[in-house]
Every structure is written in structure tokens, then in C-alpha cells.
Image (spheres, grey):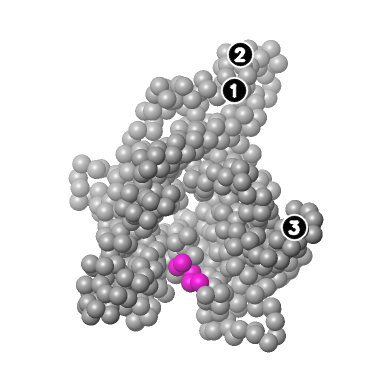
Amino acid sequence: MLAKFLARRLLLSLLTLWAITALIFAGTEILPGDVASAVLGQSATEELKAALRAQMGLDRPMLTRYFDWLGRILSGDLGVSLANGFPVDGLVAPRVLNTLYLAIVTAVIAVPLAIALGLLSAAFPDSLFDRVVNAVTLFMVSIPDFLIAIILIIIFSVEMRWFPMMLKRVDFSDFGGAMHALALPVATLMLTMLSHMIRMTRATILDVLRSPYVEMALLKGASKSRIILRHAAPNALAPIVNVIALNLGYLISGVVVIEVVFTYPGLGRLMVDAIGMRDLPLVQITGLIFCVTYIVLNIMADMIAIMSNPRIRYTS
Amino acid sequence: MTEMVGTSGKTVAAPRKRSKRERPKLNLNGWIGLIIVGFGILVAIIGPFIAPHDPGEILVWKAYSPPGDEISFMGSDALGRDVLSRMLHGAHLTIGIALISNLIGFAMGMIVGFAAAEIRGRTDDFITWLIDVFISFPPIMMALIIIVALGTDIYVLIGTIAVVSAPRIARIARAVAMNVVVLDYVEVARARGESLTSVLVREILPNTLRPLAVEFGLRLTFAILFLSSLSFLGLGIQPPAADWGSMVRENLSGILLGSMAPVLPAVAIGTLTIGVNLLVDWMSSQSGRSISEELTQ
């Protein structure tokens, strides 16, 4: 039963992944005008353009081209950048590592902190602490992330001169130095992600606390900490893991803006630059990497939710 | 533009106006939110007419000059243009585009969501799957792909935000409509032989407006932030026109010079979204759901 359900879910995810490759292909290969005139310029003759199209395989039917493209990517041939002729995989690889570094450092700090703060504010609903957390997090989720970045830069970079604002190059072999350089982008990402996670964790725990078995435990005379840690937390675990996965997904898109603010050499900035230069092979691959990561995180969240919750397991 | 602002203002305000008898009172946060949103909409409408200077005109040949004879109290931007005038024009673009795209997104999402709930069966399964596919696309990636394909025209931008929002709205509209399609009076309407359109518009729509009004506010915040982020990345409104997001981008270097030019538009975006959220928070407290519950959906 469970295996069948999981298989069904995985199959749907694979279908989704396939749909996304189709959408990315459609967006970058079918619609954006004539590649031949873009490469050769407006003044090129029709014969020249036709020759180039034939050479690039653009005169073949769309479906053939799509499956050809998909096959090449699956076999690891990511193509060549239109802007500078370098292979895409060589351009993308270091950027992926940089972005992963940023994301992992952020997640390692933000996730435990968010769960702790979310638990605390759910444990004391409507207390002063809860209200302060609620106001601050509502503020943080409301404002754009580049505003948080600007405020942090003004305070810690321009006024205090503690941390750098521009990160053209970061030396990761020196851990302390890298942490110092990454302080502001990590803080910005953390503040936005933390706020979403705290709010979701709090809502999840409060939801569990409203369930009958918690009331039962309360009536039995169990202490508040025992109810939260022994009764509520295990049942809230799956939704909280779900929240974490969702927010790591958020991190994926939040990272694009933050990398641009701090001129950080990550995958997000690579993609924005590639779009600016209409470097389509690069746009396809960076877009695919972001989308696939996002989907895999969401699938993992679903799987964990299904496996840890007998109610979902049996009713489905 | 004016007409658009008027209609959507009505949609947001719908739950407040529902009846004189049970008109709920605005709390303090609700008032603050209402004032911010009202002021924002007012500025969006009249902003371009009261701007002291042409937003594209270079008034002084000095970046980030302080307020003076030529320049109004907000100073000049990186190119020596009047920040206040650009802010006023930017309000028009930011709020106007966010509202229009949100309205289009709601129209699309509600039609699809309601139809799925009413028709059911395989159509519903297929639509639900399609919605899931669209939602599993990270919003920013979807927007970037569309922009790569179609360019950064203002109509493309409006369409992009609408298309990113629509599946999320459709999912909620479907969920809300699911509770309504089973009610007796909808059954009666079907038995009378009413057409699908008539059932959707006359039976289902009126009874889903209240929960969807809260959603409208939440999606509006998303639209404002999303548009601002795209413009900030240089992929939204293109120069010389500028919404608030592109103003932040243009003047980012001013941070180092202590200029307020990049800070003011960012603060304006933040204030506006906080205002909308306060109003949404109040509205959802009226319908018995908190914003955090909305967020966890």
C-alpha cells in the first residue's frame, strides 16, 4: 500500500520533471526569435542564415530537436555558452559549489534556530515573546529581501565597516575569512528564511496542540514541557520537516536576488547574467538545476510526510 | 488605470461592506493597513500628475545631489534625476502592475479552480495535476524563462506575474469551491438545467468571495514583491521608465555614498506590503483564519 503510494508519487514527480524540461525547452528554443539572425546579425543574407540553421540543426522538426536536446543533457553534454564559447559544465560547476556553500551555511544556522524559536512562541502563545516574534517575523516576510540586504549593508558595511559589501571572489580554503566575507549575504538570507520558518513551525505546533490527545494529556496532568516535547513534537515532526524542505526551496529562489545584491559569484547571478546576454544554453542549464533541486526538495518533503504519518499512509 | 484601481479596491474591501448590521470594526493594525493601502492607491493614481519634474529629466550633472533649488526634498538619483518625481511615477507602475496582474491571475485561477470543482472526474484530476506541475516550478524560474522567451515588455511582465499566481489561486479557488458545489442550492441550480457558466458565476462565485478576498490580499503582496524583485534584477521594467524595484537597482551604488535614493523606494515597497499584510491579517481574523495558517497552506 505504502510502496504503491510512494511509487505513484514518484511517477507523478518524474512526469513533472519532464514537463519542466519541456517548458524550459519551449521557452528558450522555440519562442525567442530566430537564432540565426541573432548570431549573424540583421544584415546576413537568407542563404547564410539557412546554412547556419541547417548546421545548428534548427531546420529539423521541433519534437526531434527537443528529444535530441533532452538526450544530450541526460548524457551529460551540457552544450557551449553562446557568449564566450566555453563549455557550459565548466562555467556552471564552480558557481553551483559557491551557491551550495552559501545555502548550506544559511540552512545550518537558520533551521535549528527557526525550530527553537517557533517551538518557544507556540509554547507561550500570546505572551510578550510570542507577540514580539510575531511582529518581527511579519515585518520580515512582508518586506523585499533586498531591503533587508540594504539595511544590513548600511549598518554593518558602510557605517561600522565590519563586513564587506561586494564579494567578487571568496577564498573558501580559509574558513574564517569565508565566514567573514559571507556574513551579510548569509544574514540576509537567514532573516527572510527564518521568518517564514518560525511562522510555519509555530502554526504547525499550535495546530497539533489543539488536537484531542493533547487535551487528554493536559487533563491527565502532564506538564507543559512534557506535552510539547513528548506529545506534540513527534506528531509535528513531519509537518516541520515539510516546512524545512519548503523553505530550502525558497532559499533556492531567494538566493538569486541576494547574489545579485552582493555580486556573489553563484549560480543565481550566472543565470541573471546569462539572461541579460541571451546566452540560452547557459539559461537552460542554470534554470534546470534550480528547478530540479526545488522539485527534489519538495518530493523529499512529501515522502517524509507520507512515511512518518500513518494517517496519510493508510487513507491514501 | 484609474478604473482598474477602483475595481480591485472594491474586491479588497468586499468583506467590510457586506452589511450595515454586522459591519466589523477595524482594529488599530487594520486602520494602519487601510491608511497605508489607501494612500498607496491614491499616490498610484495621482502620482504622475503631481510629480514636480519629468521623471526622465536630468536636472543636475551630479550623482546623488542633496535637495536644493532644482531638486525636491528627496534629492537626486545616480543620473541627477529627481527622486521624488521618479517615486511618484514608480508608484503608478508598481501598484498598477501588481493590481492588474493580480486581477488577471484571479480571473484565470478562479475560472480554472471553479470549473475543476464543478466538473470533477477526470477533468478535475488533470487540472489538479497541471496545477501541481506549475506550482512545482519555482516562481522566479518560471518568470525568468517566460522573460527569456518573450522579452521584458510591460504586458509580458503583467502576464508573467498573473501566470505565476494563477495556479496557486486555482488550487485555493478549487478547494474553496469544493465546499460550495455540494450545497443544496447548487444542486437545485443544476437540476433547473442551468449552464456551467451560470452555475459558476451565479451560484459558486458569490459564496467564495469572502475567503478569496483574503487570498487576494496575500497574492497582492506577492505580486508587489515579485515585480520589485524582477525589476531589481534588471529583468522587469526597463529604463528610462522605473518602478520602485528598478529604482533600487539603478541607485544601488548610492549606498556607499550615504544617499537615500536606493533606500526610499525599497522602504516604499516594504511599507506598502506591510500595509497590505496588516489589512489581510485583520480580514482573516474576521473570517477566523490567521495569516500563519494561510502561510502554511
Q: Which residue is mark 2?
A: A54
Q: Amino acid at mark 3?
A: Arg
> Which chain contains the residue that carries disc 3?
B
In-front residue for pair B88/B92: B92
For mark 3, give the secondary structure. helix
Q: Which residue is mark 3?
A: B190
Q: Is residue A211 above or below residue A261?
A: below
Q: What residue is shown at x 27% (from left), y 74% (from top)?
A: A217
**What x and y, as percent, mark residue B239?**
62, 49
Residue closer to the observer: B78 or A176 = A176
Quarter of the picture containing the N terminus of chain B is bottom right
CA separation, marks 3 and 1? 43 Å
Tag nearer the camera, 3 or 1? 3
Front residue of this view, candidates B283 and B123: B123
Query: Which residues are drawn in magenta?
Result: B289-293
Q: What chain is tagged by disc 1?
A: A
Residue placed under numbered mark 1 in the picture = A63
Determine which of the numbered discs, if any, sits on residue B95 in the image: none
Chain of residue at mark 2: A
Task: Give x and y (percent) for residue B258.
Answer: 44, 64
- Judging from the image, what secondary structure is the residue with disc 1 in? helix
Write down the quadrant of residue B217 in the picture. Answer: bottom right
Q: Nearer the viewer, mark 2 or mark 3?
A: 3
